[in-house]
């Protein structure tokens, strides 16, 4: 009796095996195993290695190296930590407005409201507070990108490779927190309940952000601008009242003296003018003239908001440009603010995200070297100028086409 085919498996075994060689028009398992890695796979592997693994390794390595050579975290934060204790002790945190009192860059020069906002960390010993601030700023950078709608994880990785962002963590400056504040002000610019206090707090903590008020006013948000200005002035007044208005009258002279001592070694227009042989007054006039032109452009572009749906974004970028142009001192960590113009125009990875990496060629201060000043100034100027253009990518970085974001 002949058994049905396959009843005991014998018939099935006599059938020829279908292999990659006998299969036509179909890629078999053997061929898949032997095929070379695809270009897409190699690109993804490199991305994960460079943008996911390298940032934490680099940050941890720099922190360990810093302590190994006897340096601590929070060099810039130390004056702010001490100022918070002074303010709540009712004493002035400000040094005399003399060059001899400002020589070591360890003096508090922010408005006193910054010391009030930083007070919660002042209850901890300095080493603990500096470490906590580094973590807060790390989170703030990530939140800034999140608030601005960036979902491409590669953008987070490249941002944490920027030297300005890393320096911000190491020295404990507040630039990353300011960037988060401006990101929130941009995202919720049409919500007065959020935009007003956030803009006020940012400007009160760092006065050089005042050009953002012109952006608000020029884009038909005059009430938000007026309220933010009033709230900022009130916050500064109240915080100064806590120390009996000590140092108030000498504060402008303090800032002027600080600028004259340190502007030459930064990455500002003033530093460039000095490096090219201009006098301090001529270099300052050059910066003020350039900043004034930027403000006029903010007003002109912002007034076209109803005609041009992209005018809001352009005016915002111009206001950030005015911040850089007017400031006589532009430290490396100020360039952490560049996440704002890049993120609101390029939410996926593009070549512009890599431009701030150039600051690794001139870490720290410029020390008056012309090439370093030109490099640092070119980085922020190029990023701001390029952010005016529609998004552009190259094939190796492209995920999918994306319209220019407006929110």
Image (cartoon, rainbow, N blue to C red):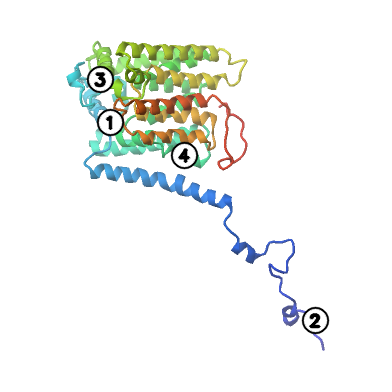
| Residue carrying label 2 | 4
Distance between the Cα atoms at labels 1 and 4?
A: 24 Å
Q: Up-down: is 7 above or below 222?
A: below
| Residue carrying label 4 | 156
Residue at left 52%, top 26%? Answer: 387
Q: Which mark is residue 310?
A: none
Q: Which callout, 4 or 3, points to the residue nearer the camera?
A: 3
| Residue carrying label 1 | 77
Q: Which callout, 2 or 3, points to the residue nearer the camera?
A: 3
Horizontal arrangement in the rendering, residue 300 relative to residue 168 (left or right): right
User: Looking at this view, is 254 or 363 the one in front?
Assistant: 363
CA neighbours of label 3 inside 10 A, class few (<14), some (14 to 19), many (20+): some
Furthest toward the right, the residue is 1
The x and y percentages for residue 329 are 33, 21
Q: Up-down: is 5 above or below 375?
A: below
Q: What element carries label 4?
A: helix
The x and y percentages for residue 165 are 38, 34
Q: Which mark is residue 261?
A: 3
The x and y percentages for residue 279 are 30, 13
Distance between the Cα atoms at labels 2 and 4?
A: 63 Å
Q: Is mark 1 on a helix, strand or loop?
A: helix
């Amino acid at each position: 009796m002949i058994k049905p085919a396959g009843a005991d498996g014998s018939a099935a075994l006599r059938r020829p095996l279908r292999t990659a060689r006998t299969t036509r028009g179909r890629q078999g398992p053997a061929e898949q195993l032997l095929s070379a890695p695809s270009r897409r796979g190699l690109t993804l592997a490199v991305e994960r290695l460079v943008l996911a693994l390298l940032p934490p390794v680099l940050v941890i390595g720099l922190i360990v190296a810093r302590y190994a050579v006897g340096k601590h975290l929070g060099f810039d934060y130390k004056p702010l930590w001490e100022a918070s204790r002074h303010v709540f002790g009712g004493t002035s945190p400000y040094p005399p407005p003399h060059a001899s009192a400002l020589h070591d860059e360890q003096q508090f020069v922010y408005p006193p409201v910054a010391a009030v906002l930083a007070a919660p960390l002042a209850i901890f010993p300095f080493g603990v507070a500096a470490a906590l601030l580094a973590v807060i700023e790390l989170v703030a950078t990530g939140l800034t990108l999140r608030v601005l709608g960036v979902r491409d994880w590669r953008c987070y990785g490249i941002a944490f490779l920027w030297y300005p962002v890393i320096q911000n963590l190491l020295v404990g400056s507040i630039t990353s927190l300011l960037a988060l504040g401006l990101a929130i002000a941009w995202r919720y610019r049409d919500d007065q309940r959020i935009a007003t206090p956030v803009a006020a707090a940012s400007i009160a903590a760092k006065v050089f952000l005042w050009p953002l008020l012109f952006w608000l006013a020029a884009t038909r948000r005059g009430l938000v601008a007026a309220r933010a200005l009033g709230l900022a002035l009130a916050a500064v007044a109240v915080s100064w009242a806590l120390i009996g208005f000590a140092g108030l009258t000498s504060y402008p002279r303090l800032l002027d003296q600080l600028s004259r001592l340190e502007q030459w070694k930064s990455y500002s227009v003033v530093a460039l003018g000095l490096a090219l042989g201009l006098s301090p007054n001529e270099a300052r006039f050059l910066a003020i003239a350039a900043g004034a032109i930027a403000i006029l452009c903010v007003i002109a572009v912002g007034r076209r908001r109803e005609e041009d749906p992209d005018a809001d974004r352009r005016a915002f970028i111009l206001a950030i440009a005015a911040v850089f142009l007017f400031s006589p001192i532009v430290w490396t960590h100020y360039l952490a603010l560049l996440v704002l113009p890049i993120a609101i125009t390029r939410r996926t990875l593009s070549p512009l995200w890599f431009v701030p990496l150039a600051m690794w060629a001139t870490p720290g201060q410029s020390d008056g070297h012309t090439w370093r000043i030109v490099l640092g100034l070119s980085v922020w100027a190029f990023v701001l100028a390029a952010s005016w253009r529609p998004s552009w990518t190259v094939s190796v970085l492209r995920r999918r086409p994306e319209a220019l974001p407006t929110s």
